[in-house]
């Protein structure tokens, strides 16, 4: 299916999260002099006109870049992203919004390489035209052509990823953000990442995905936690409570494999600000998790299909306000309790002793009950144990057991009827 056109959604809250994180990943990669390769598996058109018929149909940029455009209190890390968008609008009017390829072109250095893939025929052509115009503009300004630094290909980014890893410099940043038109896209992302990590375990992989009510989306992050990456970082942004019909994009997430150590502190600084500025109602929130690969016994705590029955990995979670809350689905109310109240799931010492005593009482038998169950021949002779022999006197070897009144010997084996005893057999 190729019906998805990102021009309808350009500049919305999901783009803000994705491109803000992308800018920070480029900043980290630029700290080393060694060149790196940027790979974009689903590049889109590269640049979007916010006054076009596509963008103005739903005006989704009013949920994202719009509220940030004239803010003067932006956190420094977020200001870097907003300044990049303002750079392509020199008139000061918000007319154009960059896609991830344009962000990469602005953030990378002359020696870094861009490998861009787009399967949609119309967007692939627009992407090539946009970069051709950008190169012509730079030539007019006297800048040297960068040759084959940027390569654009109309094709499936999932399949093309195999041939590019590992890159010659052994450094790469890969962005994967398919349209998720079909449920199979979630599986394709996981399979592509699993193979990419096998070829290039040290690469940095960033995945954008929509947080929807469908099962594939809700289980997606837990599936990615099982991939063979050394570490992962997961962040989501929710701007409003999902509607009862489940339609509309209210939340999105970024999942980074082998993330930079500098990213989590920046997210904890910026995400509360985004919730405050972009949030529409009380359902606005964010989530931050960081951990390592879920393996062994930890993987067993993840239910069938990837649904976590309990927290997995060594994730640290953040609430919308304090940054120390718990994971919940979009639209689900957050439990509240007093700051001084104790967590009922973790009782104190006194409560633990009471619980232990209750368990001991539950699984033990009272002394009175045990005393009543002891055998007393005087109370119930029928329950008396049967003697092993007719009497407890020691048996003489070779002696024949005495016949009991019931016609059975003391040993319990039957011997004839009630008639006279058989005479003894003569020997030799």
Image (cartoon, rainbow, N blue to C red):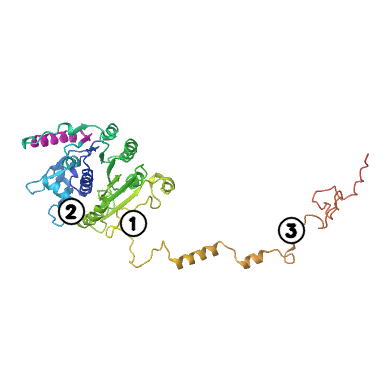
Which residue position holds label 3?
A: 385
Where residue 363 sits: x, y (%)?
Answer: 55, 61
Question: In front: mark 2 or mark 1?
Answer: 2
Label 1 packing within 10 angstroms: few (<14), some (14-19), many (20+)? some
Residue 144 visible in the current orientation: yes
* Disc nearer the start of the sequence (2/1): 2
Spatial CA distance of label 3 from label 1 is 61 Å
Q: How many marks?
A: 3
Vertical comparison of 400 with 353: above or below: above
* Residue located at (45% from left, 66% from top): 349
2 or 3: tag closer to the N-terminus: 2
Residue 131 picture quarter:
top left
In the image, the segment drawn in magenta is 114-138
How busy is the neighbourhood of tag 3: few (under 14 within 10 Å), some, or many (20 plus)?
few
The residue that mark 2 highlights is 76
> Is 307 positioned to the left or the right of 150 in the image?
right
Q: Is 123 placed left or right of 425 in the picture?
A: left
For marks 3 and 1, the one nearer the N-term is 1
Residue at screen point 48% across, 64% down: 355
Q: Name the element at disc 3.
A: loop
Q: Nearer the viewer, residue 207 or 214?
A: 207
Residue at numbered disc 1 = 326
Give the percent coordinates (x, y) of residue 279. Answer: 22, 56
């Amino acid at each position: 299916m190729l019906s998805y056109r990102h021009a309808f959604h350009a500049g919305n809250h999901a783009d803000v999260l994705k491109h803000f994180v992308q800018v920070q990943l480029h900043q980290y990669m630029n700290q080393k002099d060694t060149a790196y390769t940027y790979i974009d598996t689903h590049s889109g058109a590269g640049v979007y006109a916010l006054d076009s018929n596509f963008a103005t149909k739903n005006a989704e940029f009013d949920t994202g870049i719009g509220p940030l455009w004239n803010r003067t209190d932006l956190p420094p890390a977020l200001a870097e992203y907003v300044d990049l968008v303002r750079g392509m609008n020199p008139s000061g009017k918000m007319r154009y919004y960059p896609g991830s390829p344009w962000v990469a072109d602005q953030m990378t250095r002359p020696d870094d390489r861009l490998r861009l893939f787009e399967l949609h025929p119309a967007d692939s052509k627009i992407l090539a035209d946009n970069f051709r115009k950008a190169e012509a503009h730079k030539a007019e300004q006297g800048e040297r052509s960068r040759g084959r630094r940027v390569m654009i290909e109309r094709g499936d980014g999932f399949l093309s990823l195999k041939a590019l890893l590992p890159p010659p410099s052994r450094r790469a940043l890969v962005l994967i953000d398919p349209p998720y038109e079909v449920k199979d896209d979630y599986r394709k992302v996981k399979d592509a990442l699993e193979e990419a990590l096998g070829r290039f375990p040290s690469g940095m992989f960033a995945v954008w995905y929509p947080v929807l009510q469908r099962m594939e989306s809700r289980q997606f992050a837990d599936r990615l936690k099982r991939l063979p990456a050394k570490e992962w970082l997961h962040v989501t942004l929710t701007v409003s409570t999902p509607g009862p019909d489940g339609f509309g994009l209210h939340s999105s997430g970024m999942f980074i494999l082998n993330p930079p150590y500098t990213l989590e502190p920046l997210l904890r600084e910026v995400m509360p600000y985004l919730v405050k500025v972009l949030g529409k109602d009380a359902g606005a929130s964010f989530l931050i998790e960081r951990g390592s690969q879920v393996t062994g016994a930890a993987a067993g705590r993840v239910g069938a299909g990837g649904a976590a029955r309990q927290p997995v990995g060594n994730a640290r979670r953040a609430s919308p306000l304090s940054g120390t809350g718990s994971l919940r689905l979009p639209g689900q109310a957050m439990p509240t309790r007093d700051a001084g109240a104790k967590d009922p799931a973790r009782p104190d010492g006194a409560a633990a002793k009471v619980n232990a005593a209750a368990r001991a009482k539950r699984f033990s038998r009272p002394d009175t009950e045990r005393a009543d169950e002891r055998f007393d021949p005087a109370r119930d002779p029928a329950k008396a144990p049967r003697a092993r022999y007719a009497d407890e006197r020691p048996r003489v070897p070779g002696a024949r057991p005495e016949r009991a009144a019931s016609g059975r010997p003391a040993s319990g084996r039957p011997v004839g009827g009630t008639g006279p005893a058989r005479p003894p057999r003569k020997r030799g």
